[in-house]
Image: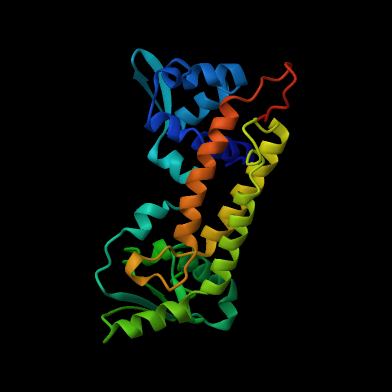
Amino acid sequence: MKPKTKELLYHLLWHVDMLSRPTFRNLTDSYESWAYRNGFTDQLRRLESRGWLERGTQFDHAVHRLSPAGRLVALGGKDPESLWSRVWDGRWRFVVFDVPVVHGAARTRLRRHLRSCGFGFLQNSVWVSPDAVPPSLSGLGVESSAVETLIVLEAHLASRENDSQIVTCAWDHQEIDRRYARCLEVLDGFPGRFGRGNPQGRALREWGEQEFEAWRAAVEIDPMLPACLLPPGYLGRKVWRRRCEVLALAGEAARHMPKSGTGGDQAEFG
């Protein structure tokens, strides 16, 4: 995906608040007119053709919405609310494997894929997740010729304390919270926070780039465990609530940004 495409999806996420709670002004100022004014019409059509936007109508006005797939992309690949609220069956899934040194590249690919699926590691060849293991070894990116042993185990641990130990050992929540703290710093630096006036387009765009990168860096390493497994002091949920508040403000600022050529410095998307 082109960076500009991801950037546009991210900025469209700012407008979700308008679409979920429409007013008469919001409806008459539809996405079609907003896109036309800001020169995004072609980009929106391309996103719609890829299934990332959905077109609908409200009170005879055309409205674009982020599709579930588009919203997931805009969120950085993970939907926090659905992940934290998922029901855990109390069982851990362990993947234990042996890949010879001569197949180091295959071992690296396997570890990266396990991490991308939310697995944490207890040892370099022992990985764990509270969720079901993908149904096939090919889904794990395993090359059968390179793997001498790969065993999948399910276990119900003896006590809640053991579950907490698994969480502490398998994921680096100190680093996860450090990245979320960075997210809070960026959110608190929203350029419209000092007054009622709208920030200039360049400042808003630069802030958006920093905010998205800070969020992406955090969710990249956060397994977003079910709520019952989250460690004490975990910052992710606090940051998510704050992020929703600030992105709603960003969407309001973007909707009232002066057009290019009228004195404003508007964000551009290619």
Report if residue 85 is visible in the image.
yes
Front residue of this view, candidates 101 and 267: 267
- 188 or 75, nearer to the observer: 188
> Could you say where residue 37 lies in the image, as x and y percent from the top left?
59, 17
Nearer-the-camera pick, 190 or 176 = 190
Relative image position of residue 147 (x, y in whole percent)? 46, 77
Quadrant showing the C terminus: top right
Tell me: 172 left or right of 51.
right
Point out the residue furthest to the front here.
Answer: 195
The number of numbered badges drawn on the structure is: 0
Quarter of the image containing the N terminus?
A: top right
* Residue drawn at (53%, 41%) of the image: 247
Left or right for 58, reference 18:
left
Q: Above or below — where is 2 with respect to 210? A: above
Q: Residue at x 64, y 30 (%)?
A: 198
> In the rendered image, which quarter is residue 139 located in?
bottom left
Could you say which quadrant of the image residue 97 lies in? bottom left
Q: Is residue 58 above or below residue 118?
A: above
Pick out the residue farthest to the top: 60
